[in-house]
Amino acid sequence: QVQLVESGGGLVQPGGSLRLSCAASGTVFSINAMGWYRQVPGTQRELVATITSGGSTNYANIAKGRFTISRDNATNTVYLQMNSLKPEDTAVYYCNAQVWAPRKYEYWGQGTQVTVSS
């Protein structure tokens, strides 16, 4: 019912910046929260940041002070501004959307590659 499409990934040098976007489309009454997760091959997918429709944010420690999550509820779009990027930020970044009512459900995007390298 809901499709998530990420964009904005690419190659950037250490210390650089990148802005990821994710737009939700399809049939959905209300998306309560959206966020970003990342995954390196061979490791578990980990939280980067989330934001609720009310504007409450949650950041992983590795993102605090460097990344900023924002959203546009009217278009069900979430953004991730990434600054001061480090090589360890290299991963596939996945967009996530949560519906809490009338029942709990979760959606995932296809992922966008972020590579931080000199």
Image (cartoon, rainbow, N blue to C red):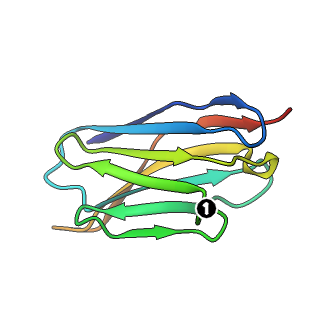
Tell me residue 46's x, y (percent).
Answer: 63, 62
Tell me residue 61's x, y (percent).
Answer: 63, 71
Q: Is residue 72 left or right of residue 3?
A: left
Residue 53 is at least partly visible in this image: yes
Q: Is residue 26 left or right of residue 51?
A: left
Relative vertical location of residue 52 with respect to residue 27 in this rendering, above or below: below
- Is the residue marked by circle 1 packed among few (<14), some (14-19), or many (20+) residues within 10 Å? some
Relative vertical location of residue 20 with respect to residue 43 in this rendering, above or below: above
Could you say which is closer to the camera, residue 82 or residue 52? Answer: 82
Image point (52%, 30%), residue name = 8
Residue 64 figure quarter: bottom right
- Disc tally is 1
Image point (64%, 58%), residue name = 45
Residue 110 is at least partly visible in this image: no
Q: Which image quarter is the N terminus in?
A: top left
Q: Is residue 80 left or right of residue 30?
A: right
Judging from the image, what secondary structure is the residue with disc 1 in? Answer: loop
Residue 97 figure quarter: bottom left
Tell me residue 47's x, y (percent).
Answer: 57, 63
Image point (48%, 47%), residue name = 80
Q: Furthest residue to the right?
A: 118
Relative vertical location of residue 104 with respect to residue 4 in this rendering, above or below: below
The residue where tag 1 is placed is: 63
Could you say which is closer to the camera, residue 13 or residue 29? Answer: 13
Image point (77%, 34%), residue name = 13
Q: Which image quarter is the C terminus in?
A: top right
Tell me residue 90's x, y (percent).
Answer: 74, 44
Q: Amino acid at mark 1?
A: Ala
